[in-house]
Image (tube, rainbow, N blue to C red):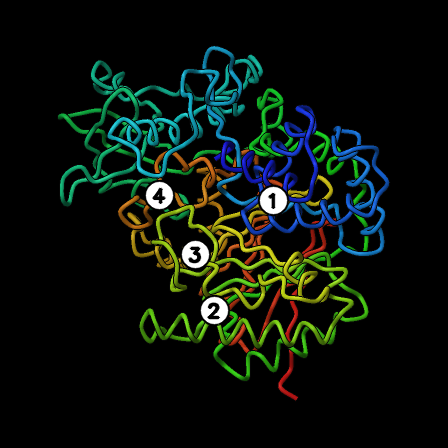
């Protein structure tokens, strides 16, 4: 990948009559590699256009010449696009792993897992995928004051976590184990960890008011008798606040592939009080009523542009076949592009982020899923022959599902999945039989407790094994946007806000507004008047 980008950079500069010094070439390679191909082309074109109008002594360009152009970018954007927003595609993130010897997270290559993650791993990659999920939950659970002897007072009561292999010698003794809840035999549930598996008896179990889904991690208390672990009580692992988790990150971050200067600038920037994100789901571009209400939405924010608009799929109301879907989507994005040109201030000040839905055309729904293909989004991606089209193309981001936003140090995860229904269908226990249970609260608590966006079986929601880290929620971000088909909700766990904007057309054109400075979510709706 880096060789292809390097070749593109060198050829682009040679065509314009420039030759890059080694430090300038290395700097550009680091800056452009995390971007998708379309944005690489846009930035190279803009950079070369600026270089040609500047007075440069000779054809040889140094790193200082490139930095001078970047400062020109910043000056030209000082009253335009909000440069404090970083849009991070899942495939641009840096893979991390938990190192037991160092008791902190480190880049994978430091512990012998060299090379970039593969889309199609071998059997060893699948085993590694489950071990990583287990270690992710185990390390934060073991630090909790209920299980860590270091953090407990001498007079305080607590529990000692035991591996499953320990159960073989504990007949009649009450113990607590952390394991993955799974069905290794049809109709029989097991708990599994890296040391083994054990059949469990949950006929007399007292469950907490949570969602326990197949392949999620749970804490179980009980006794091992008659070749089975009789579970007296079952609950979810504790949720660890982000500030506590950051102590054990060791300075590592999934954003490490992005330039350090950019990340530092984002972390040090103050969050403007008036900054906001506008988020809506199921933007059906084949429905005239949806386009009409989108025009009302853009009109309402035309004089006070948000930092970004996040539009999530599905982008068609129903599928009519692959070929027809492509034609309809292309026409829909063309209509959207024409509409956006009516609002030049929004194009100048806002970003437009498009998250693919499960029924949108493209690659398979194995996660993380790449963004929408160029063939259907060309009307918004094409630079065209005028400045307005070029500017709009630069403001649009065709992200993966999931993806992450970093705004002045605030991290927001965007996640399009009908996860609540899947969790309920694969639940081991039915907590909704209890009156007064908030299903959205229970569902999001299971995500935070498992530190993962999709704690269900890979058979239900397939995942690229070596890219599973892109779905981690550790440390917890500031907000997780669950674009789901269920009703809108807003809940909070350990300082992280989980919210669902609801279906834009199905729920009378509702959407959410998120204020990153205050971590607050506001319900909004467009009337039919």
- Which residue in the structure is indicated by mark 3? 417
For the residues marked 4 and 2, what is the alpha-carbon distance in whole angstroms? 23 Å
Of callouts 4 and 1, the N-terminal one? 4
Q: Is residue 486 visible?
A: no
Which structural element holds mark 2? loop
- Which residue in the structure is indicated by mark 1? 496
- For label 3, the crowd category at 10 Å Cα-Cα, with few meaning under 14, some 14 to 19 and many 20 or more, is many
Which structural element holds mark 3? loop
Q: Position of residue 391 (x, y in %)?
A: 70, 60
Drawn side of residue 110 relative to residue 123, left or right: right
Which structural element holds mark 1? strand
Of callouts 4 and 2, the N-terminal one? 2
For the residues marked 3 and 4, what is the alpha-carbon distance in whole angstroms? 13 Å
Depth check, front residue: 467 or 138: 467
Q: Is residue 461 above or below residue 524?
A: above
For the residues marked 3 and 1, what is the alpha-carbon distance in whole angstroms? 19 Å
Q: Nearer the viewer, mark 3 or mark 4?
A: 4
For the residues marked 3 and 2, what is the alpha-carbon distance in whole angstroms? 14 Å
Of callouts 3 and 2, the N-terminal one? 2
- Which residue in the structure is indicated by mark 4? 463
Q: Position of residue 195 (x, y in %)?
A: 27, 19
Drawn side of residue 58 relative to residue 314, left or right: right
Q: Is residue 436 above or below residue 245?
A: below
- Which residue in the structure is indicated by mark 2? 315
């Amino acid at each position: 990948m880096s060789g292809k980008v390097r070749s593109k950079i060198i050829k682009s500069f040679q065509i314009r009559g420039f030759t890059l010094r080694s430090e300038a070439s290395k700097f550009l390679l680091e800056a452009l590699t995390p971007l998708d191909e379309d944005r690489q082309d846009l930035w190279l074109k803009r950079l070369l256009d600026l270089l040609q109008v500047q007075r440069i002594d000779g054809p040889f360009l140094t790193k200082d010449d490139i930095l001078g152009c970047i400062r020109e970018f910043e000056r030209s954007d000082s009253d335009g696009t909000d440069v404090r927003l970083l849009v991070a595609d899942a495939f641009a993130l840096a893979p991390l792993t938990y190192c037991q010897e160092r008791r902190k997270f480190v880049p994978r290559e430091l512990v012998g897992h060299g090379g970039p993650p593969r889309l199609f791993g071998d059997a060893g990659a699948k085993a590694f995928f489950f071990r990583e999920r287990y270690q992710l939950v185990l390390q934060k659970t073991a630090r909790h004051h209920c299980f860590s002897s270091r953090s407990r007072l001498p007079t305080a009561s607590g529990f000692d976590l035991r591996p499953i292999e320990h159960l073989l010698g504990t007949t009649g003794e009450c113990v607590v184990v952390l394991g993955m809840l799974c069905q290794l035999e049809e109709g029989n549930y097991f708990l599994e960890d890296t040391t083994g598996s054990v059949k469990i008896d949950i006929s007399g179990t007292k469950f907490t008011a949570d969602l326990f889904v197949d392949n999620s991690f749970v804490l179980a208390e009980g006794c091992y008798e008659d070749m089975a672990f009789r579970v007296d009580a079952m609950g979810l692992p504790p949720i660890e606040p982000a500030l506590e988790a950051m102590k054990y990150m060791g300075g590592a971050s999934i954003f490490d592939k992005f330039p350090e200067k950019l990340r530092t600038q984002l972390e040090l920037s103050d969050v403007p009080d008036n900054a906001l994100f506008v988020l809506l789901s199921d933007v059906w571009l084949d429905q005239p009523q949806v386009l009409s209400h989108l025009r009302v939405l853009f009109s309402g924010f035309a004089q006070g542009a948000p930092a970004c608009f996040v539009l999530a799929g599905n982008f068609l109301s129903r599928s009519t076949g692959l070929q027809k879907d492509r034609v309809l989507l292309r026409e829909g994005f063309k209509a959207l592009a024409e509409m956006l040109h009516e609002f030049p201030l929004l194009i100048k000040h806002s970003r437009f982020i498009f998250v693919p839905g499960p029924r949108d055309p493209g690659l398979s729904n194995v996660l993380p899923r790449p963004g929408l293909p160029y063939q259907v989004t060309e009307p918004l991606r094409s630079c065209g022959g005028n400045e307005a089209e070029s500017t709009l193309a630069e403001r649009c981001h065709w992200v993966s599902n999931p993806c992450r936003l970093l705004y002045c140090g605030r991290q927001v995860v965007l996640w399009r999945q009908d996860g609540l229904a899947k969790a309920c269908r694969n639940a081991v226990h039915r907590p909704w039989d209890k009156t007064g249970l908030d299903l959205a609260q229970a569902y999001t608590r299971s995500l935070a407790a498992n530190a993962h966006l999709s704690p269900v079986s890979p058979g239900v929601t397939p995942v690229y094994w070596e890219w599973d880290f892109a779905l981690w929620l550790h440390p917890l971000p500031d907000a997780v946007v669950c674009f789901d088909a269920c009703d809108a909700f807003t809940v909070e766990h350990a300082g992280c806000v989980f919210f669902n904007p609801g279906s834009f057309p199905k729920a009378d054109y509702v959407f959410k507004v998120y204020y990153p400075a205050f971590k607050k979510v506001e319900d909004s709706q467009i009337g039919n008047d």
